Image (spheres, rainbow, N blue to C red):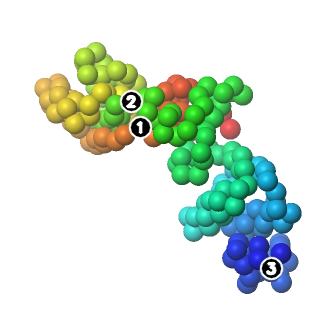
């Protein structure tokens, strides 16, 4: 038990009543209680919800240590960056049904290409209508007030997108080009972002 207290950085709190613990300390205590018998299998349900970044990083470190010691960890989370960083395999569940499963890299590779996200001054729908029919766009949608495009080669599509917007007198406010993330996989598989998902 002393080793777990040390490993979970609870030394300073070990002699206090748990009611005085911070949220991060309580989460780490929960993990410690699950580890005290040296399980081969551990289920963690949303272990970092509501934690500050420092406590969240400590929990991530502990999950990695458990994995390295041979414990199989089933992790449920709405933080897809967490799933990407910690999980060997991911299952995306939509309304109780698995809609995608694989390693994080396999799932992201299945989208292929790049993701371009941009917003214009007040006319997102017009911008979407202007660009979605272009040959370099594989898929286009509005999400959270921005136009979200899946394209084959972002570095080649970006100048064409900018020319189209400029030619239509649409004022560009933000633009971002990135490789697909698990958030993009979720959006692609379910048709909505996690922020739009029912709790």
Question: Badge 1 local density, few (<14 within 10 Å), some, or many (20+)?
Answer: many
**Residue at (26, 31) in percent of width and height:** 153
Q: What residue is pinned by disc 1? A: 180
- N-terminal of the two: label 3 or label 1? 3
Q: Is residue 79 visible?
A: no
Callout 1–callout 2 Cβ contact below 8 Å: yes
The residue singled out by tag 2 in the image is: 112
Asked whether the residues under the numbered discs 3 and 1 touch, taking CB atoms below 8 Å apart as contact, a structural biologist would say no
Instruction: Write down the residue under mark 3.
Output: 2
Instruction: Compare marks 3 and 2 and give the one earlier in the sequence.
Output: 3
Dot placed on the residue nearer the N-terminal end, 1 or 2: 2
Which image quarter holds the N terminus? bottom right
Query: What element does badge 2 sit on?
Result: loop
Q: CA distance from mark 1 to mark 2?
A: 7 Å
Residue 116: image location, x then y, percent? 32, 35
Identify the residue at horizontal 30%, vertical 22% (top origin): 137
Q: Is residue 175 left or right of residue 104?
A: left
Residue sitting at 34 percent across and 31 percent down? 113
Q: Nearer the viewer, residue 38 or 100?
A: 38
Residue 20 lies, with reference to residue 109, above or below; the image says below
Q: Position of residue 127 (x, y in %)?
A: 28, 25
* Residue at x-position 43% and y-position 29%: 111
Residue 70: x percent and y percent?
Answer: 71, 56
Q: Secondary structure at mark 3?
A: helix
- Quadrant of residue 173 in the image? top left
- Camera-side residue of 97 and 35: 35
Labels 3 & 2 near each other (Cβ < 8 A): no
Side of 182 where 22 appears, left or right: right
* Residue at far front of view: 70
């Amino acid at each position: 038990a002393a080793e777990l207290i040390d490993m979970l950085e609870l030394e300073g709190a070990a002699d206090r009543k748990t009611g005085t613990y911070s949220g991060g300390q309580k989460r780490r205590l929960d993990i410690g209680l699950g580890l005290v018998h040296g399980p081969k299998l551990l289920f963690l349900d949303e272990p970092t919800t509501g934690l500050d970044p420092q406590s969240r990083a400590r929990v991530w470190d502990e999950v990695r240590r458990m994995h390295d010691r041979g414990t199989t960890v089933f992790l449920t989370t709405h933080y897809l960056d967490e799933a990407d960083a910690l999980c060997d395999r991911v299952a995306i569940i939509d309304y109780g049904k698995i809609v995608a499963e694989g390693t994080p890299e396999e799932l992201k590779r299945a989208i292929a290409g790049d993701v371009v996200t941009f917003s214009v001054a007040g006319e997102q729908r017009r911008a979407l209508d202007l660009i979605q029919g272009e040959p370099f766009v594989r898929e286009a949608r509005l999400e959270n007030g921005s136009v979200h495009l899946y394209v084959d080669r972002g570095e080649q599509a970006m100048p064409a997108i900018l020319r189209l917007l400029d030619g239509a007198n649409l004022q560009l406010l933000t633009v971002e080009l990135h490789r697909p993330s698990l958030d993009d996989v979720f959006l692609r598989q379910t048709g909505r972002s996690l922020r739009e998902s029912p709790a």
